[in-house]
Image: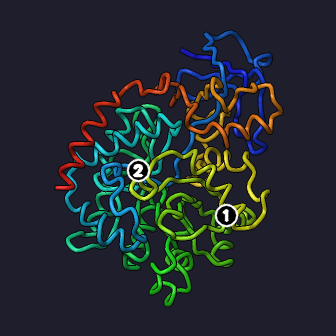
Amino acid sequence: MPQRFRAPVVLPCDPDCSVIRDGVVDVGDDGRITFCGPAAEAPGDLPVTELTGILLPGLINAHAHSPMTLLRGMGGDLPLLRWLHEIIWPAEAKLRAEDVRAGMLLGSVEMLRHGVTTSAEMYFFAEQMAEAVLETGARAVLGGPIIDLPGVDWRRMIEVADRWIDTDGLRFGPGERIELSYAAHSAYMLPVEALRQVAESAAARGALVQIHVAEAADEDARQRAEFGSVPRLLEEIGMLRGRVLAAHAVHLSDEDIALFAARGTGVAHCPGSNAKLASGIARLTDLRAAAVAVGLGTDGPASNDDLDLWEEIQLSAMLARLSTKDSTALRAKDALLMATRGGADALGRDDLGALEPGRWADFVHVDPDGPAFATGLDEPDEQVISNLVWASGSRQVRDVWVAGEQVVTDGETVRVERSKAQSTARDSAARLRA
């Protein structure tokens, strides 16, 4: 039945990052929002859930490899390419379908407890990832990686993605919790023929393409020598004319940024992973100035090493300010919007990332009972948002809903017992280390 949620502070995450005092969010039978605004303006009478703190949209992790919870901490002091070739890819060669399911289940539990309701995932055994996400009640955009490695047939990977989308459609599950995508690993790990075929398959189905772009300075030397840059390569083969999410996008030229802006290409900014692997600092202020849609991503929990998007909110602002030597380069509300509305824009989803009528009722309740809000929620709007971003973060997330269904209560997942998810993941990780 329809529901009403009332809170002292509601952050709809509209473009202005408005603060609604004594606000409500109404949810229809279909799990979508029907109203968001002041309680005094709410239409009709509905059963009311009274909340004590801040209600805001679920965060969107725009780039993740969440099953890598099993590999957390491995090779943590190596640069990107050595880390991949010497540590990660050999470990991943041992993965079984049940391992990926266990890793994704734990990753989904971790994210929900941090208020992340949607994640864009690129990893093997995508069907098992979908099963895990549907079990926790979260939401995900999934793609099995298309990659050219010994013993791996990228053509078959594209065919598998084609068949799955043609069979189940782009979105399925209760509340359309799963969206399918094409996950082309990168231009440096695929021949041009493969990239072109991915672009054609995705365009024919209106699907998103997730792809790593310009993450490390030395990864794409051959592509830059031949095409000028990876974005120019993707433009030449037609990929940028469809829905594309470029993950990392650290080493971009002015021309690359202008191309992304012209084509509506989204970017997943992953400041924590990029810093940990010393890959560099993305040109965030330049991307935003060019009106490129930018969301935030954690990357994998073996390169971050967690799935807490609130940390990326803080890091995005701090690194933008540090790299530009401008403490106003990215305000607290700008960073919050990147983790919500910006992530939806980067994914090409107008049904997520904000508390607006017609969007899915994915939202988070932040409890004010803690040091971050000890001075109260009646402070000026700017101060409430600042305390949420800089002082509170994931520590105060208490309740989470996806498509109007409560999936986290008092900090713990409702559908999945966390201890069991951790135990299963522990068993899989032990086998991978053996």
Coloring scheme used: rainbow
| Image location (x, y in percent) of residue 186 | 43, 71
Q: How many marks?
A: 2
Determine crowd level at label 2: few under 14, some 14-19, many 20+ residues with C-alpha closer than 10 A: many
- Report which quarter residue 228 is drawn in: bottom right
Numbered badge on residue 192: none
The disc, 1 or 2, on the residue closer to the chain's N-terminal end is 2
Rounded to the nearest whole Å, what is the CA distance between mark 1 and mark 2? 25 Å
**Residue bearing the label numbered 2:** 142
- Residue lying at 47% horizontally and 51% vertically, measured from the top left: 120
- Residue lying at 45% horizontally and 48% vertically, measured from the top left: 306
Determine crowd level at label 1: few under 14, some 14-19, many 20+ residues with C-alpha closer than 10 A: many
Q: Considering depth in this image, is 352 or 433 the residue closer to the camera?
A: 433
Q: Secondary structure at mark 2?
A: strand
- Residue lying at 38% horizontally and 78% vertically, measured from the top left: 193
Image height check: is 108 above or below 225?
above
The three-letter code of the residue at mark 1 reads Leu
Q: Considering depth in this image, is 250 or 162 the residue closer to the camera?
A: 250
Q: Quadrant of the C terminus?
A: bottom left
| Image location (x, y in percent) of residue 23 | 73, 23
147 sits to left or right of 238: left
Cβ atoms under marks 1 and 2 closer than 8 Å:
no
Image height check: is 332 above or below 398?
below
| Image location (x, y in percent) of residue 420 | 28, 31
- Report which quarter residue 370 is drawn in: top right
The three-letter code of the residue at mark 2 reads Leu
**Residue bearing the label numbered 1:** 284
Q: Secondary structure at mark 1?
A: helix
**Which mark is nearer the camera, 1 or 2?**
1
